[in-house]
Amino acid sequence: MKINKKLKEYIEKNVFPEYDKNESGHGINHIKDVIKRSFEIVKENQLDVNMDMVYIIAAYHDIGHHIDSKTHEIISADIMSKDKNLSDFFSEEELRIIKEAIEDHRASAKDNPRSIYGRIVSSADRNNKVEDCLRRTYTYGKKLNPDATDDELFLRAYDVLQDKFGENGYAKFYFKDSQYEKFLKELRDLLKDKDKYISTQREYIEKLKKDKKL
């Protein structure tokens, strides 16, 4: 799906480098994945939307995560809204929708996103690979508590994933997505056995450390 070339160049040069400030679970690889997943959701559901808007929402949605993870969606939206260069690409109404969509993307939000754009990026921001869950819950837990042992981090990760993706989890999804459905089944099967989950995460994290990828 084609994106305005000048917009893409601007974001890659001026926005993407800011993600070096985030921990790896919310770094540039995650952002690029959310952009890719957003486009896939649009295509699979044949949604009639402005792809430049989808792109910019996904590109900005976690930019303020290093400032405060608990309110990062509000911070990220504020950072985007202060980027005056974006007025070269979007109208005031489009920028309002973009800002709201960034504010609304968080899985734990009580209310549903206010627009289709918020629903797209919120859906794309959900994990769709079990290994990504194993890594992100570990690295983020380590950031929150650098002194925690791996055993403590694995237990925390299990509780977090159960709360988010378990049978009664809070993570919402708004569109048909075959990749996500496959992932959710695999993760829920793993979460049924706590010891198996911890063993699986331990093995994966130890491999990442051995390969110097963590």
Image (cartoon, helix red, strand yellow):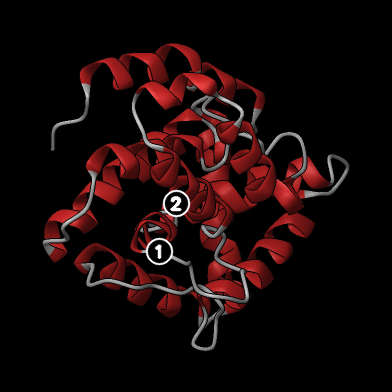
Kindly identify which residue carries mark 1: 115
Specify the label residue 106 is tagged with.
Answer: none
Residue 163: percent from the left, percent from the top?
A: 62, 77
Left or right placement of residue 142 versus residue 171 in this view = right
- Which amino acid lies under the numbered mark 1 shown in the image of this protein? Ser
Quadrant of the rendering where the C terminus is positioned: top right
At x 65% / y 38%, what residue is drawn? 78
Left or right placement of residue 118 versus residue 76 in this view = left
Residue 95: percent from the left, percent from the top?
A: 45, 41
At x 56% / y 33%, what residue is drawn? 80
Left or right placement of residue 3 versus residue 114 in this view = left
Residue 153: percent from the left, percent from the top?
A: 73, 55
Looking at this view, name the residue that lies furthest to the right. 147
Residue 123: percent from the left, percent from the top?
A: 39, 62
For mark 1, does the 10 Å Cα neighbourhood hold few (<14), some (14 to 19), or many (20 or more) residues? few
| C-alpha gap between disc 1 and disc 2 | 7 Å
Kindly identify which residue carries mark 2: 97
Residue 146 figure quarter: top right
For mark 2, does the 10 Å Cα neighbourhood hold few (<14), some (14 to 19), or many (20 or more) residues? some
Q: Tell whether label 2 touches label 1 (CB within 8 Å).
A: yes
Residue 83 figure quarter: top right
When the figure is inspected, residue 45 is found, relative to residue 192, above or below; the finding is above
Of callouts 1 and 2, the N-terminal one? 2
Residue 118 figure quarter: bottom left
- Which amino acid lies under the numbered mark 2 shown in the image of this protein? Ile
Looking at this view, name the residue that lies furthest to the bottom. 168
Q: Which element carries disc 1, helix, strand or loop?
A: loop
